[in-house]
Image (cartoon, rainbow, N blue to C red):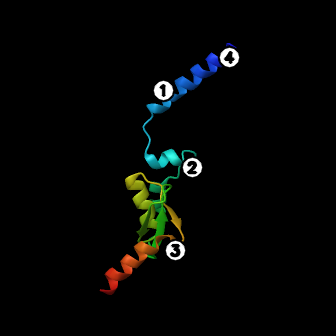
């Protein structure tokens, strides 16, 4: 029976520590993702200016000029956008087409 209070104490202490750790909301949802050095990747990247769609772990999408632009944005803004299929950014892509055709 003494193990139960000790277990609760450990859980309580862990909760206290966790509540003081500053994390971004997107890191909260995928805390076990591997850390990628986007700054290093952006330094090695050659721009090809082929537009891509990027999505973060919260499902927020945005268009990038190319993969290098995605790496640079992630580095500068401390984000974790990933290259996804262009269909995911269909609304952003449609808005870009309207800007260039008007």
> For mark 2, what is the residue?
33
Sequence-wise first label, 4 or 3: 4
Which residue occupies the foreground of this view, 84 or 37? Answer: 84
Of pointers 2 and 3, the one earlier in the residue sequence: 2
Label 1 and label 4: CA atoms lie apart by 20 Å
In the rendered image, the vertical position of residue 92 relative to residue 21, given as above or below: below
35, 17: nearer the viewer: 17
**In the rendered image, is residue 45 in sight?**
no
- Left or right position of 70 against 8: left
Position of 22 with respect to 57 (left or right) is: left
Determine the secondary structure under disc 1.
helix
Say which residue label 4 marks. Answer: 3
Q: Nearer the viewer, mark 4 or mark 3?
A: 4
Q: Earlier in the sequence, mark 4 or mark 2?
A: 4
Residue found farthest to the top: 2
**Disc 2 and disc 1: Cα gap in Å?**
23 Å
For label 3, the residue is 87
Identify the residue position indicated by label 1 in the image.
16
* Residue 83 on image: x %, y %: 52, 65
Q: Residue at x 50, y 52 (%)?
A: 37
Measured in 3D between alpha carbons, the distance from the residue under mark 3 to the one under mark 1, in whole angstroms, is 42 Å
Q: Quadrant of the C terminus?
A: bottom left
Q: Please identify the residue farthest to the right as the structure is shown.
A: 1
Circle nearer the N terminus (1, 4): 4
**Could you tell which of marks 3 and 1 lies nearer the N-terminus?**
1
């Amino acid at each position: 029976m003494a193990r139960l209070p000790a277990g609760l104490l450990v859980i309580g202490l862990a909760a206290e520590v966790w509540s003081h750790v500053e994390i971004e909301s997107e890191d909260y949802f995928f805390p076990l993702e591997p850390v990628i050095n986007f700054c290093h990747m952006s330094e090695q990247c050659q721009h090809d200016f082929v537009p891509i769609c990027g999505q973060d772990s919260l499902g927020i999408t945005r268009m990038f000029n190319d993969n290098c632009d995605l790496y640079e944005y992630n580095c500068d803004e401390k984000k974790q956008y990933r290259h996804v299929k262009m269909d995911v950014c269909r609304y952003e892509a449609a808005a870009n087409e309207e800007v260039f055709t008007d």
